[in-house]
Amino acid sequence: MKSHDVMVIGSGASGGIAAKVLTEQGLEVLLLEAGPSISGSDFLTHHMPYNFPFRGVGSPSVIRKEGWLAAREQTPFDGYYTKSSQHPYSTAAGKPYKWTGRSRILGGRTLHWGRQSFRLADFDFKGASIDGYGVDWPLTYAELSPYYDKVEDYVGIQGFKEGLPQIPDGRFLPPFAYNCFEHVMRKAARKKGWRMTALRTAQLSRPHRGRPACHYCGSCSSGCAVGAFFSSVAATIPDAAATGKLTLQTDAVVREVLVDQEGRAKGVAYVDRNSKEEREAFAKVVVIAAGTLESTRIMLNSVSRNHPNGLANSSGVLGHYLTDHFTAGQLTGVLPELVDSEILNDDGKSNGSYIPRFRNLGQRHPKFIRGYAIMVKGGSSIFPGHANLIDGFGTNYKRQIKKLHPAIVRVYARGEPLQTFDSFVEIDKKVVDAWGIPTLRIHYQRTDNDRDMLQDSFQQLMELMHTAKAEILSADESLSSPGEIIHEMGTTRMGNDPKQSVLNKYNQAHDVKNLFVVDGGSWPSSTCQNPTETIMALAWRASDYLIQQFRRDELL
Amino acid sequence: MKPKEIRRREILKTIALAPPTLVQAASLQNVGAIAQVSKIPGTAEPSWKPGFFTSAQNRLLETLSELIIPETETPGASAALVNQHIDLVLSEETKEEQRTFVEGLNTIDQISKSQYDKPFSGLSQDQQVALLTRLSDDRQVRPEEERGRRFFLDLRRRTVFAYYTSRVGIHEELEYKGKQVLLEWEGCPHPGNHGDSG
């Protein structure tokens, strides 16, 4: 059987970048994807709810069996969202974790990601030096910055330059213009002393590298058939394929990484998704990019004489320090100056605005460390969710729903959870998935800092709404369930000390030279920014390093 | 806002300029899908019969949903076939959810009979509105009517969903302007940008 130079496991944001960078530098790459290929003809992005029997949300019986995302009628691709019945996992008593938004399909979660793209701040890389909690990153902003440039040039990210240290400026495409509710809220934010800027998103405001500009249909979560927002299927995989160096194997559900006598990675054992036959594939270097939790699961399932506690786990930290960002408080309100105004197309650009972190930037908050950003969404959307937040029925009710429709604003805080050893995953041998592979048992631990941050963020959200003179329709003073934000991080953390971390600063396993893990698992602190752009920058940097080491025969 | 709509021809041109990618073939078909949006289910079929409810339950459901979202300048819940959607959804729900909903419909009739000595369908519209007004207002609702109040809120949620995801609710009532193909995003058209000085 052919042995490739490099095998990449997973075709999402990080696996796609690795495949592109490695093939473009001449390496023979085998890209394994657990799900099927995506058939573009099935995109139903422009359909209306009434085009579907269950108005797009799916049948209650399917929702019960497979989960509400897999039941969605607008994305009828196998694996666009995984089916609960095929992908079980368990949680520890009293520690709920909603592992959601999972995908098993070519392109992975890039097909439906939120597209928000921010750089981390210089201070995000050295949190421990600033406040004493946790560890600093083993690399600096300056080291990653050239790779942010590369990612932005390649991916295409629209946004305003603001000169703010919390979200450093980059190489942006021209920004989308603000909607009315955003102008109202920007005015309010300014009164609070905050700068509010449009969410920076991987959506094209003009044609870019052969991909067409956004046409503002506003239905990004149902997939983009024209590739106007960044996905692996629209960009990295075709680019890798064009080199002639890519072998793509879909429907390959990886069971474990195989190692040689010395404990070096030599390939994988995988299960054919359809026939369920056991297969193997081999490569000189293995890059795992299956998503934080799935990558960790593969590694914990890869037990051998050399790696009795899971692959590259001599430190014992593999699977630990799991975090998912949280939403800390959420308010929905009505902006009086927009009530009963003409209904506009507010959801076409499919994003909103952002107030970058303002806590613990110099002056220490007495109650908590780190911080949160505020997301601002609103305007008229396709469904008037506020109808369930106001009283009444009949003609007045119907008229009121319409009057409030253009005036709705929703704000919520997105916070940094602290990483702790006590948040971890382990293998539950008793529960296997549809391919007979042991599954994860998740133990997620919130910290007091999370809860103290919520108190402050809720107060600040209320003040922002009052400053905007908004009438509050609903106020949720709680933290989102762990897992819900779909920003898993930390379980294969990077660091300089092999006793305290799984990976080095190049996403290379300390214990296994020819093994790299390039998804969000490497993050040694979570920050409060959306992670994908940084994940791609790290994957690009790791790939460059891999190529350099490969050429020097350092990985053999 | 007067967004420029791209003509189909221009879209095809944009797509033709892009180099071949895996999504290429999809693009053309997807643009075609916009034109097909008008070919949809949801227009009244005289032969429709409830799959879950009895005829009497269906009639009561239709009456109640029309009271919640009545015909105004635009059609109401009845014309939007809200009852048909709720019937379909209920048919796929659990036995317990089905039983709770049917008991709720019965509760409305019981409250009506205890107060007016008639089923809900026998009341004048003013009486029907008066009964629902009490159920919808937690200051007026009587303790023994709590089940009726819970049912009202559940029914209102289902009615809102079915109405505002229907063709009538989206296009006629809320004049939805999204899911268009636009050349550029022009943002807020209000003069002065609400005092946002940039």
Image (spheres, coloured by chain):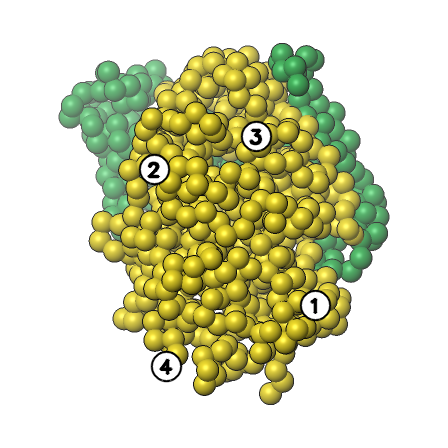
Chain colours: A yellow, B green
Q: Are marks 1 and 2 on the same chain?
A: yes
**Dot 4 or dot 2, earlier in sequence:** 4
Badge 1 element: helix
Q: Are marks 4 and 3 on the same chain?
A: yes
**Kind of residue at badge 4:** Arg
Pointer 4 chain: A
User: What residue sits right under mark 4 in the picture?
Assistant: A305
**Dot 1 or dot 2, earlier in sequence:** 1
**Kind of residue at badge 1:** Thr
Q: Is residue A526 above or below residue A362?
A: below
User: What residue sits right under mark 1 in the picture?
Assistant: A23
Contact (Cβ within 8 Å) of mark 4 with mark 3? no
Q: Visible in this render: residue B157? A: no
Pointer 1 chain: A
Toward the viewer: A116 or A24?
A24
The quarter of the rendered structure image containing the N terminus of chain A is bottom right
**Dot 4 or dot 1, earlier in sequence:** 1
Between marks 1 and 2, how big is the CA–CA gap? Answer: 42 Å
**With A294 as the anchor, is B21 left or right in this view?**
right
